[in-house]
Image: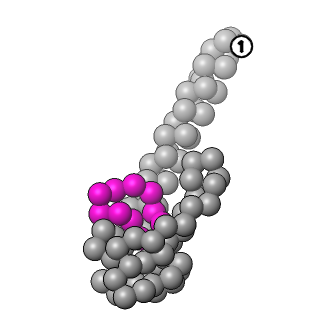
Amino acid sequence: MELKPGDVVMLKSGGHPITVAEVNEDSVECVWMGIDGDLFRETLPVAVLEAANPDDEEEDDDEEDEEDDEEEDDDEDEDDRRKGKVA
């Protein structure tokens, strides 16, 4: 796999997307943000990485947005019922 700084990859075993910072012969230095906003930097062997599929991320985001919209609609319907409004 041909990698260059700025590429987004993932561990083959799963996890969050990580960004390639530097490429060496058999290893890649990667950076990523932790859950609490901490920045991590680690050197990993090329063999444990695969290219992240940005299409999958967009689909996941779209699904989350749709779920959020449905929850908001449900909340609004419930508020209307409490106020005596009929939908």
Report if residue 48 is visible in the image.
Answer: yes
18 or 29: which is nearer to us?
Answer: 29
Q: Residue at x 67, y 12 (%)?
A: 82
Is disc 1 placed on a helix, strand or loop? loop
Q: Residue at x 55, y 27 (%)?
A: 74
Check the image and report above or below for 54 versus 67.
below
Q: Position of residue 3 (x, y in %)?
A: 40, 84
59 or 15: which is nearer to us?
Answer: 15
Graded by Cα atoms within 10 Å as few (under 14), some (14 to 19) or many (20 or more), the crowding at tag 1 reads few
Q: Main secondary structure of the magenta part?
A: loop
Check the image and report above or below for 9 versus 2.
above
Quarter of the figure with residue 2: bottom left
Check the image and report above or below for 63 versus 75.
below
Q: In the displayed structure, does residue 36 sit left or right of residue 5?
A: right
43 or 81: which is nearer to us?
Answer: 43
Q: Position of residue 9 (x, y in %)?
A: 41, 70
Q: In the displayed structure, does residue 35 sit left or right of residue 48?
A: right
Q: Residue at x 37, y 88 (%)?
A: 25
Q: Residue furthest right?
A: 83
Q: Amino acid at mark 1?
A: Lys
Q: Which residues are magenta?
A: 9-18
**Colour setup of the view:** one colour
Q: Is residue 13 magenta?
A: yes
Report if residue 50 is visible in the image.
Answer: no
Q: Position of residue 42 (x, y in %)?
A: 49, 67
22 or 77: which is nearer to us?
Answer: 22
Q: Position of residue 39 (x, y in %)?
A: 62, 60
Residue at label 1?
83
Check the image and report above or below for 76 versus 18.
above
The N terminus is located in which quarter? bottom left
Q: Is residue 1 magenta?
A: no
